[in-house]
Amino acid sequence: MDVIKIALVGIGKIARDQHLPALSADPRFELVATASRHGSIEGVTAFQDISELLKAVEVDAVSLCTPPQVRHELAAAALEAGKHVMLEKPPGATLSEVEHLRGLAADKGLTLHATWHSRFAPAVEPARAWLAERKVRSAKITWKEDVRVWHPGQEWIFEAGGLGVFDPGINALSIVTRILPQPFFLTSAELHVPENRQAPIAAELAFKDAAGNPVTAEFDFLQTGPQSWDIDVETDRGALKLTHGGAKMFVDGALTHEGPDREYPGLYAHFAELIANGESDVDVSPLRHVADAFLLGRHTAAPAFDY
Ligand code: NAP
């Protein structure tokens, strides 16, 4: 297959930390241009606007690394121009706009890849296989991190559509929607929104699965000291624990799987395969759970937050 000429849009933290190294190491891709109002990458043709880029440079694909609030317009422009598109998580600010992109890609015979990087953590597929052979009794998500460390100065995350603590929380939801054998549904939620912000800084969620078993989640953006990205699942035959965002798996306390961080190389390998096969991968289930929490959740005022 020919090398896929790709453009990166939105040169911020995740573009630099993960997309660039993953693309540099993957011979299936050639990074030929960027579009970002302020950011650029040394040695790569830079534009401030995606429409200028699409007019001036021949690319096969566009990978969008902006915040979700502006993603739909950029993705639609790229698809309209005949480019395959990869979306950072969450795939959009609303479910409807993602459905629009799905339809556009299908109409044009293009690949749309709505990525969930945490699903490529090394212990996620082993956990899925282990749980597929057991009856789940309960599941508990604990996702607590320090927003000042992981999202320094990112004002967009606390604006409407930025998801607040659901920006990391959706990573946990992307894992549980992959590994739990049964679908689950929100029954109640409490969202703590700082009085000077639009999006929650902490949340507690309660779900039940189709068999009535409880699934709970605790999200917190103010965790200092050790950080928690854990999922505990009790089953009829043992207890599973995923830690470090899905990098390690324990069964009844014993480590069974761990591996190096290959999340973004995995995402680009999958994108290349989807393009080669003429397919798309757009699973909105993690975003749907977040939308449900914003629909059903009680909003309580939390102290003002500043970086
Ligand atoms: P970021 O550091 O703020 O970078 C996003 C870039 O998008 C900005 O540098 C900005 O570049 C561009 N942009 C375009 N429109 C914007 C707007 N209205 N407001 C702010 N920036 C805008 O954010 P990030 O951490 O890279 O996150 C981007 C996406 O990646 C999010 O959806 C996030 O959930 C996802 N993600 C982040 C991480 C992480 O650890 N940070 C991990 C996985 C996934 P210009 O000013 O040059 O246009």
Image (cartoon, grey):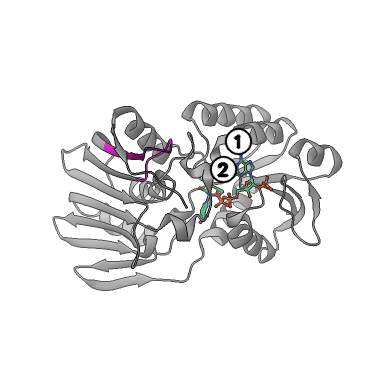
Q: Of residues 55 and 294, which is closer to you in this image?
A: 294
Q: How many marks?
A: 2
- The residue lying at 59 percent from left, 30 percent from top is 101
Q: Is residue 236 left or right of residue 171?
A: left
Q: Residues within 10 Å of mark 1 (few under 14, many from 20)?
A: some
Furthest residue in direction right, as rendered: 56
Mark 1: amino acid? Val
Residue 88 percent across, percent down from the top left: 55, 46
- The residue lying at 59 percent from left, 62 percent from top is 17
* 99 in relation to 201, above or below: above
Identify the magenta region: 190-201
Q: Which residue in the protein does label 1 denote? A: 70
Does mark 2 have its CB less than 8 Å from ligand 1?
A: yes
Contact (Cβ within 8 Å) of mark 1 with mark 2 = yes
Residue 263 percent across, percent down from the top left: 51, 60
Q: Of residues 229 and 100, which is closer to you in this image?
A: 229
Does mark 1 have its CB less than 8 Å from ligand 1?
A: yes
Mark 2: amino acid? Pro
- The residue lying at 19 percent from left, 68 percent from top is 252
Q: Which residue in the protein does label 2 denote? A: 67
What element does badge 1 sit on? helix
Q: Is residue 184 visible?
A: no
Residue 20 percent across, percent down from the top left: 66, 60
Q: Is residue 288 left or right of residue 250?
A: right
Residue 82 percent across, percent down from the top left: 73, 35
Where on the picture, by quarter, is residue 244? bottom left
Q: Give me the disc on residue 33.
A: none
Q: Is 42 one of the magenta-colored residues?
A: no
